[in-house]
Image (cartoon, grey):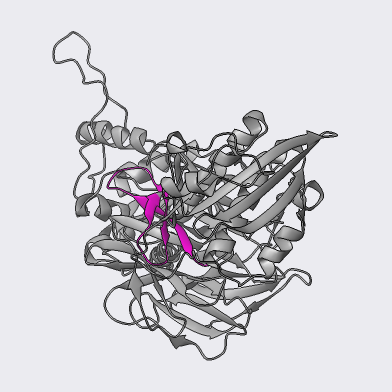
Amino acid sequence: MVRSFTGSTVLRLALVATAAASLAACQSKPKPTYPTTPPSTPSEPSTAPPTTGPVTGQATAPLPGSAQDFVVNVGDRVYFDTDSHDIREDARPLLSAQSEWLRRYPSVVVRIEGNADERGTREYNLALGARRANSVRDFLVGQGITSSRISTISFGKEQPIDPGTGEEAWQKNRNARTAIVSGAR
Amino acid sequence: MTKAKARSRNPVAALLFTLLCAITAAALAAPARAEIEVNVNRGDVQPLPIAVPAFGGGQTGADISQVISANLQRSGLFRPLDPASFIEKGLTANVQPRFGDWKTINAQALVNGQVTVEGGKLRVDFRLWDVFAEQQLLGLQFTASPESWRKVAHKISDAVYERLTGEKGYFDTRVVFVAESGSRLNPVKRLAIMDQDGANPSYLTSGDSIVMTPRFSSNSQEITYMSLRPDSSTIYILNLETARRESLGTFPGMVFAPRFSPDGGKVVFSVERAGNSDLYVMNLSSRTSTRLTTDPSIDTSGSFSPDGSRIVFNSDRGGSPQLYVMGADGSAPRRISGGDGRYTTPVWSPTGEFIAFTKQTGGEFHIGVMRPDGSDERLLTSSYLDEGPTWAPNGRVLMFSRETPGGAAKLWSVDVTGRILQPMPYPGAGSDPAWSPLLN
């Protein structure tokens, strides 16, 4: 099913926006803040909450140890420079947090998906995405995560998260995503 | 799953051609070139005015001439004249043309023919004339099943092209490519196949996985391609005749960038392990694979020379993606591309004369060609995103995919001089084209 490939990306971004808004109220544990680049994705929930009215609803915080918890409270994606697979300084705190989360939930198995922007040819970009996925894998293994819990794949330039053109979109599309395969709540 | 709609087309059984008569034999024995000659090498050539009146024999005759006319037009080497300007009407293959009538409208060459149906078989006679020399250049007869009329038209186009240019034609060929639909965030990519003129398109896969980079084998009946799923990549070999699909096998990492050897007995491809991509070759009969490169850089996009002795490939071992040539056993790799820019997707031409490639420079993408030693580099196109050239079997035309910013990929072609650049006659979005060899 092609749709399941990235089908939930938009939904997930919307979820992040909603959930993040409610976190301050609901979260018991202080949420670490990580510098991420690009800093924010201006993705808004499709339905704005009513400004007035007797009842207001908020999304509940993700269940600790869930895939949603990982995406919202840790972050599943780090970004790369053009034609580079070096882990950037600004990605290290997020990957350290991923390691910490994976240590806390030792049954979780992940797959690192490497991605490239459209400014390269298909086959080379598959190879480049594979390098990026392995850079993340090596980092996590370096932080003590067992390598058998981590698989990698490259989507090359086939799975952009920003359909636009220009450096801002390309920067978002040069990334590696840590996807939870199994073991989460 | 492969919902292969690959239609079996056994052209050998469906078609046989014979030399028409002694007149033809005499004409063929005459000097190899008549007075008219089309030079495929010159970039500034004026297309040759040619008349292709409707073949006799009803609608099929008219349809056949239209396909021939469109083929010749798209080659950029011929300028089919408007049938409304024709003076002589109702010309069949069995009479001598009134050359004066054709000279008046300045037709340099004339193709006329006749279609008859005999015992359920389609018979097409045609002649090619040098109008000003008043000389027959070619007379051929094709017999085929009636539904193969387009194939007959392509065969005639190839015969005309070959007679007037001295080069093999490329019209009786097919193109396999990736038909794209969906959105950029949720692309649906299906393997598809069509005639080189865009006719008879059909899907070969259902779109349940992302497919990429299909390539023909030299027998035109097998395609190798890569399939990408969320957790795995696979290289397949698909037989068009039987619709049977087999995997190249499982490997420790990703597999991609497959391409057949010229004899069809091997596939060169990339295997990625721990982030390092290297070239391997698999012998398809023994199913054994051999590693060809061991460099800790990206090595991919291998393409055999037509004699099978060498492989051109893409590597960033020198710091940026460049083209290298090595022995087919992996020996003595040598960089052939130079200058500024990033070079990828090298493809050896069927004649061995050139290597086509994609080049990125100055924020633009180009399709270009160079000699196998790296000399005579020429960029043929320039756009926001041109990628992935494939050669027509005569080595004169390249097809590739072009994307505008934010737009869908489309199939385009350019001749090796760079003069004749045009979109392919396929209305949909498509990428990764691969041209078949000439069919039988």
* B411 drawn magenta: yes
- Observer-nearest residue: B184 or A183? B184
Examine the rendering and report whether any part of residue B153 can be seen.
yes
Instruction: Tell me which segment is drawn in magenta.
Output: B395-422
- Observer-nearest residue: B97 or B59? B97
Report the quarter where the C terminus of chain B lies. bottom right
- Observer-nearest residue: B160 or B111? B111
Farthest bottom residue in view: B332
Residue depicted at 42% across the width and 46% down the height: B104
Report the quarter where the N terminus of chain B lies. top right
Residue depicted at 36% across the width and 48% down the height: A160
* B367 drawn magenta: no
Residue depicted at 31% across the width and 52% down the height: A173
Tell me residue B251's x, y (percent). Answer: 63, 66
Q: Quadrant of residue B293?
A: bottom right
Tell me residue B388's x, y (percent). Answer: 44, 60
Tell me residue B282's x, y (percent). Answer: 68, 72
Examine the rendering and report whether any part of residue B3 can be seen.
no
Q: Quadrant of residue B415?
A: bottom left
Farthest left residue in view: A52
Tell me residue B95's x, y (percent). Answer: 66, 44
Answer with left or right where residue A151 lies relative to residue B184. right
Farthest right residue in view: B119
Answer with left or right where residue B200 lies relative to residue B368. right
- Observer-nearest residue: A63 or B376? B376
